Amino acid sequence: MEPVTTRQLNRWTLARQHLLERAGGLKGASGAGGLDPVSGAGGLDSVSGAGGLDSASGAGGLDSASGAGGLDPAAAVEALAGMQAQAPSAPYLGLWSRLAGFQVADLEAALHARTVVKTTVMRGTLHLVARSRLAAFRLATGSGYYDGTFRLLAGLGLDLDAIRARVAAQVEERTRSRTEVYRLVAEQIPVPHPPWVADRPSAVAALSVTTDLVNAPEDALYGAPAKSRYEVLRTEEPSPLEAARQVASDYLAAYGPATTADLAAWSGRPARTFADGLASLDLVRFRAEDGRTLLDLADAPRPDGDIPAPVRFLGQPPLGPRPPRAGAGRRAPQAGDRQERRRGPDVPGGRRRRRNLERPAPDGAADAHPATARAPGPVGAASGRRGGSAPPGLVAARGGRGAHRLGLTPFGRPSAGVRRPLLIQP
């Protein structure tokens, strides 16, 4: 079994996430431009300033790091095994950092064409997924909490398929909120309801939300409020083996090499769900520095560990790839990892917010968050909206008319000696 270093794993994951070099962007159904979701301008790579695909023209070409050519938004979302979409604007920034010449209108056109849909899948959270993968993701990913609630419903002697069919018929008449979906399910449960029905409204609604329904496209438009209105989108259910194989393959293509525990944590389903699917794939194995066995697709790209990694803007945690477990060998655990709640010096005004500090550093060093400069303008420093606050890990200060400074804060809880951020001034 071939050994692999942490730095190699870092580069392999970044390459598959299209964070070493932008993939050549292709226009979606609209064929039209739109606003750059970061700078408000079209096409220019203001992050790395590098040549190649990161150009003002957004011309295509071969991505030498990942082996991918041009990608439209639907193909990119498919290649990334879905994108976190709890914050509606998050996928737009994520794709802008990955696709040359990406425009807001490209993803919005894919959403209206239903080639990309917003739905509840992995871990019971909102993601964008490619329509071509929706059926497999519905069946092979999920949430243990939701699954437990479904078992409780079945334990009441209810016909869950019949309930789903009646809810879908109601939703076909007009879009419904999650609260309305919950009420449609709950009214079919004999009264008096067990106490847990009222205690688990989101999980009870998930009986339909995770199977027959998807979010309306308007929920996923750039700048849309964080709300959910559901519509019906039925899919032909694959066999459990086909679904497990597809999801496992997509996960390794986007995040591998990885352990089966990584796959289970990402998908929200036990590792045994994917045992037969993994056995049917052509896999290779690596030994991480900590001794763990990592699985990978035999034909997956694995660039050299010394390839340069530019800074990429991923913004708030939902924008980027889910951090691999420490066992995957990417980065040793640091004090203060996971989530903390504090008054952060990197949030202007000391506004309290929840931050997830465990994120892979794009330059291979585990002590800096990815950050990017904004084009000077009247909008709030390092923010996409007037008066907004900077993303976690990014400190911005005005240094005179049109000047900006960026601060990179370390992973974990910084000690008093390193609490002051590193300032970078062009």
Image (tube, grey):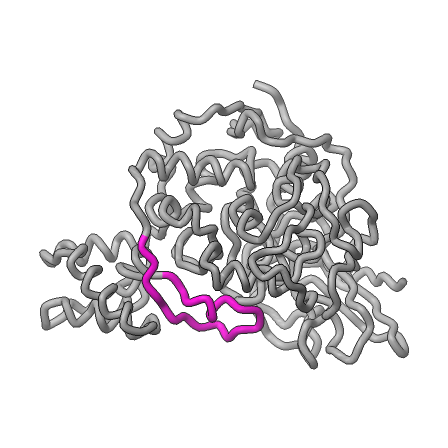
Query: Residue 416 lies in magenta, yes or no?
Result: no
Relative to 69, is 114 above or below?
below
- Residue 397 in view (yes/no): yes
- Residue 336 in view (yes/no): no
Q: The magenta stretch spans which residues?
A: 214-234
Write the residue at 57% across / 50% down: 321
Relative to 55, is 89 above or below?
below
Relative to 313, is 51 above or below?
above
> Left or right of 52: which side holds 303?
left
Q: Which of 412 and 235 is in front in this view?
A: 235
Q: Which of 404 and 50 is in front in this view?
A: 50
Query: Residue 225 lies in magenta, yes or no?
Result: yes
Number of numbered labels in the structure image: 0
On the image, which quarter does residue 382 sit in?
bottom right
Q: Nearer the viewer, residue 8 or 74?
A: 74
**Furthest residue toward top:** 1
Relative to 35, is 413 above or below?
above
